[in-house]
Image (cartoon, helix red, strand yellow):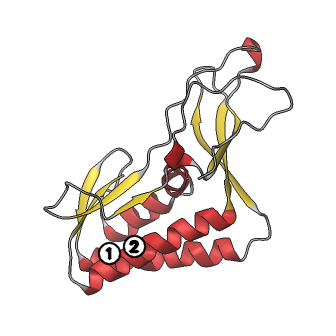
């Protein structure tokens, strides 16, 4: 995997190691506060989502990249799921989903994939947090990487639903 890079006009030091190697699809666009020209506010590391077969949480069956996981929250994906299914999938929470819910989530992921594939831009940019001074932390993700990860997640969910597996989500 490639390491994420700061995207800015002036060279600066790394942003406090906030990204790990598994956050490789993301690049920080701006986590710099203009009032503190030489300082970075530490932004929390982008949290990967982990998916397990229920009752077997020793080893995840899939790890969704941190930037892609953040995009699902920033894009309103989980809010739409929660509103339509009456679920409470939340960031930094753990939940279980049975086959009927897995199929509906997979279907919604398919809609996201189609929408992303119809875009012309090579990158997707979104806000994933705020500095204490109120400045947006913006992340840029390659559209193809985002689509690839969402397709893999969709396939996992559809396969688990077909096998009538219950999955645990650690979002």
**Residue 87 shown left or right of residue 131 in the figure:** left
Counting the numbered discs, the total is 2
Q: Nearer the viewer, residue 32 or 20?
A: 20
Question: Which residue is the extreme one toward the front?
Answer: 1
The label shown at residue 105 is: 2
Q: From the viewer's perspective, is residue 83 above or below residue 50? A: below
Q: Position of residue 19 (x, y in %)?
A: 54, 37
As helix, strand or loop, the secondary structure at mark 1 comes to helix
**Residue 45 shown left or right of residue 121 in the figure:** left
Question: Which residue is the extreme one toward the bottom?
Answer: 162
**Residue 84 shown left or right of residue 129 in the figure:** left
| 10 Å crowding of disc 1: few (<14), some (14-19), many (20+) | many
**Residue 12 shown left or right of residue 110 in the figure:** right
The label shown at residue 163 is: none
As helix, strand or loop, the secondary structure at mark 2 comes to helix
Q: Position of residue 107 (x, y in %)?
A: 45, 80
- Residue drawn at (21%, 76%), measured in percent from left and top? 165
- Residue drawn at (75%, 23%), measured in percent from left and top? 12
Question: Based on the displayed image, in which of its 4 quarters is residue 7 positioned?
Answer: top right
Question: Which residue is the extreme one toward the left?
Answer: 55
How far apart, in angstroms, are the residues tagged by discs 2 and 1?
5 Å
| 10 Å crowding of disc 2: few (<14), some (14-19), many (20+) | many
Q: Nearer the viewer, residue 115 or 160?
A: 160
Q: Position of residue 95 (x, y in %)?
A: 25, 57
- Residue drawn at (72%, 36%), measured in percent from left and top? 6
Q: Are marks 2 and 1 in contact (CB under 8 Å)?
A: yes
Q: From the viewer's perspective, is residue 90 above or below residue 43? A: below
The label shown at residue 102 is: 1
Q: Position of residue 125 (x, y in %)?
A: 70, 51
């Amino acid at each position: 995997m490639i390491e994420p890079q700061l995207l800015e006009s002036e060279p600066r030091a790394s942003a406090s190691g906030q990204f790990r190697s598994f956050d490789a699809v993301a690049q920080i666009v701006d986590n710099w506060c203009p009032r503190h020209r030489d300082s970075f506010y530490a932004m929390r590391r982008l949290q990967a989502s982990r998916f397990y077969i229920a009752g077997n949480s020793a080893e995840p069956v899939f790890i969704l990249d941190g930037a892609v996981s953040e995009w699902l929250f920033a894009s309103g994906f989980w809010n739409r799921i929660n509103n339509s299914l009456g679920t409470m999938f939340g960031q930094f929470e753990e939940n279980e989903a049975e086959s009927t819910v897995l199929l509906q989530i997979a279907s919604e992921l398919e809609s996201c994939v189609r929408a992303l594939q119809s875009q012309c831009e090579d990158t997707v940019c979104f806000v994933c947090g705020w500095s204490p001074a109120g400045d947006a932390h913006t992340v840029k993700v390659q559209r193809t990487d985002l689509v690839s990860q969402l397709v893999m997640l969709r396939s996992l969910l559809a396969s688990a639903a077909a096998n009538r597996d219950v999955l645990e989500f650690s979002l």
